[in-house]
Structure formats: structure tokens, C-alpha cells
Amino acid sequence: MFKIVSIPGDGIGPEVVASAIRVINTLARQHGLEITIEEHLFGGASYDVHGEMLTQETLEACRKCDAVLLGAVGGPKWENLPHEKKPEAALLGIRKELGLFANFRPAKVYDALVNASSLKPEILAGTDFMVIRELTGGIYFGEPRGYDDTRGWNTMVYEHYEVERIARLAFDAAMKRKKQLVSIDKANVLESSQFWRNIVHEVHKDFPEVELIDMYVDNAAMQIVRDPKQFDVIVTKNLFGDILSDISGMITGSLGMLPSASIGSSHALYEPIHGSAPDIAGQNKANPIATIASAAMMFEHSFCMKNVADEIYSAIEKTLASGFRTADIANPEDTIVSTTEMTDAIVANLEAS
Ligand code: NAD
Ligand code: IPM
Ligand code: MN
């Protein structure tokens, strides 16, 4: 028996979470799994009801369940609130409170989508790398932070244990893949990056089979676009991981394709990497695949059911191969389907298998 807490959030969050829940319920029925899904308010949706972006009730529910499924938060309605009251601050709060220090963002190009990206198909075909983003430290959380009329400031700081634990996890991940790890930093300019690099090299001594490559973040941004196939596992700081994973999203055809798993020592949360997409919210246009694939990551990591995760990936693959395209991954000659039509097709492929 598994208990999932879903926090759909704002904008397209509820639309894409509804899609993932249909997929989860289909699989639960097929495999005779007892999965309960409890929905809670989060972000602007919570603020509008309770005056708080993250209530104790939602946080407690997230603490008590086996896995959290998150849509997205934020939007123009709440963007002028004081900084610490913004939905995005609540997202950082939930990550910190649940201790979700490692964020896995897999960038895999589906064969059917090699023509969907703005990059050339021959550059993309076969791309399959994992961005491991440190998620509870660095400049996102460093103190002091603030602004007044004359200055604005943030602090990029890492503790030794924070770098060591993410580095260990990244080397472990590389051992299970092609044994190559690219650590991305800005050690030529930032002391906190030199510190990061030193620790990654210390940890490397315990993983001699893994090839370790240091890369500056500016070069890395260019290399991901120039030749994404050169990467296997990437490990990087919070801010760099945020930026590089959006670039990686576009490599896969659209931000709407990239799932993620945020993992800590006792909790896990699954969410697409994209935001609430206010420009298309409420129009049944959003690509639900990033969220559906996030549910696949949930089956694999939280429920230890890789077989079920693989069923989801292959249903996505079949659906794309048979030509289903939401607007974000469509070429001019394609017929565009809605969020619900894409979900119907994925569910139908699951039911047919
Ligand atoms: P965004 O990711 O919401 O959207 C960027 C662009 O990608 C938009 O054109 C959008 O339509 C498109 N897009 C995103 N997801 C899509 C999907 N599933 N299908 C089709 N198209 C998709 O980023 P933004 O516009 O910079 O931010 C909007 C709001 O979302 C902001 O408030 C931001 O802070 C928030 N945000 C939240 C999260 C999160 O909750 N994890 C992540 C990123 C941004
Ligand atoms: C993401 C988002 C968040 C981040 C924001 C909304 C706080 O961009 O999950 O990638 O920067 O981590
Ligand atoms: Mn982001």
C-alpha cells in the first residue's frame, strides 16, 4: 500500500498532475496495487484560500506519505508579493523541510522527437544524460540575503557535508551508468566553486573507476548545445543546475518533456522541471509528459518498481511514435493534440500492453 500526496499548485500544475494521476490509477488497477492519492493545496492556490503558500497541514501530509507529486507553482497573480511570501519561496521551503538535497533531471531524447527540437536531429539522436542538481544549498539558501534601495545581495555558500553527499550520490549514479561524471562549477572565479571542486576530487578517490571531468559552467552551457551526447552524468550546484536543466529540457524537444525526482534521506518529491506556464494555463494545451514521466520516476525510486516505470516510458514512446504531439513538440505539419488527448493516448497504450 502506497500513499501519494499530490500538490497540483498553480497554472498548468493541476492539468498535468491530473494526467499523471490517471496514469498512476491505470497502473494501480492493472497491477493490483493499493495506492491512495490525497490532494493538498500548495503555492498560490493555497495562498488564495489560507493566506499561506505552504500550510503546516500540507507540510505534515508531505512528511507522512511515501511520495509527493507536485505540479508547479507561481504566476503573475502572486509575483508582486514580498519575496519571502512568493510561491517560489514556498517551493524552496518544502524542499528544505523535507531534506530533498538531490534533484535528478534525466535528459533523454525519444527517437520520435529528434525533429521536435530547435537543434539538428543528428546532434540529438541518442542523447541520454542525467543532471544531478544540488537542491537545498548554495545561493538559493545562503545568508545574508536581501535588498534595500541601494544594494541587493545573496550569498553563495556550501558546507563540506553538502558537497560531499551530492558528490557521492553522483559518483554512485555514474557507476550505474557509463562511469563518466562531469562536475560543473565556476572555480576560475568563485571560491565556493573551488571548494566544491576540491571536495568532488576527494570523493573521486573512492570511485576510481569513474572518469571525472571538471567543466566551467559557461563552457558547459555551450557544450550541452554543441554535443549533448558527450555527457553521461552531470553534477552541479543549485543555481547552475537550474539553468542547465532548462537547456537540457530543450534538447529533449521541450521543457514539457523533462521530469525530475527530488530525493533526501527520508522523503521524495516528483515534479516536472517546468513552471506553471501562465501563458497556456487553463487551455488544455500543456504537455503532460514531464509529469507523467515524473510519476515513472516515483514508481522506480519510491516504490522500487522499475518494471512499472518502464511500462510508462514505453507507453510514452509508443504514443509519440504514433504521432501524438502537443503544441510544444509539434512541427508545422503535425496535428496538435490537447493535454487530455495526449493523456488518453498514453493511458490507452498502457491498457493495450
Ligand atoms: P515556465 O516553465 O512556466 O514556462 C516557460 C515556457 O515553457 C512557457 O512558454 C511555457 O508555456 C512553456 N512550457 C512550460 N511547461 C510546458 C508544458 N508542460 N507544456 C508546454 N509548454 C510548456 O517558466 P516561466 O514562464 O519562466 O515561469 C512561470 C512561473 O512558473 C513563474 O512564476 C515561475 O517562478 C514558476 N516556476 C515554477 C516552477 C516549479 O514550480 N517547479 C519551475 C519553474 C518556474
Ligand atoms: C525549478 C524552478 C524553481 C528553482 C523555482 C520556481 C524556485 O525554476 O524547479 O527549476 O529555481 O528551483
Ligand atoms: Mn527552473
Image (spheres, helix red, strand yellow):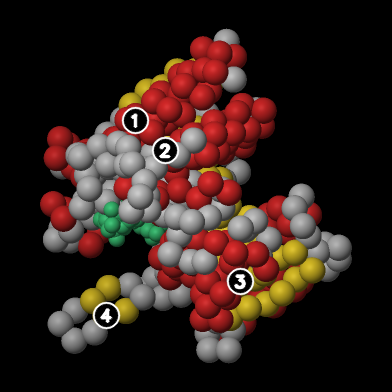
The image position of residue 297, as x and y in percent, is 56, 38
Q: CA distance from mark 4 to mark 3?
A: 37 Å
Left or right: 52, with 33 as reference point: left
Instruction: Name the N-terminal-most of marks 1 and 2.
Output: 2
The image position of residue 30, as x and y in percent, is 56, 13
Residue where numbered disc 1 is placed: 341
Residue where numbered disc 2 is placed: 324
Tell me the SS state at disc 4.
strand
Instruction: Name the N-terminal-most of marks 4 and 3.
Output: 4
Q: Amino acid at mark 4?
A: Gly
Q: Residue at x 53, y 89 (%)?
A: 189
> Is 308 in front, or is 41?
308
Query: Of the residues tagged 4 and 2, which is closer to the observer?
Result: 2
Q: Are marks 1 and 2 in contact (CB under 8 Å)?
A: yes
The image quadrant where one finds the C terminus is top right
| On screen, residue 199 above or below 162 | below
Q: Are marks 2 and 3 in contact (CB under 8 Å)?
A: no
Q: Which mark is residue 152?
A: 4
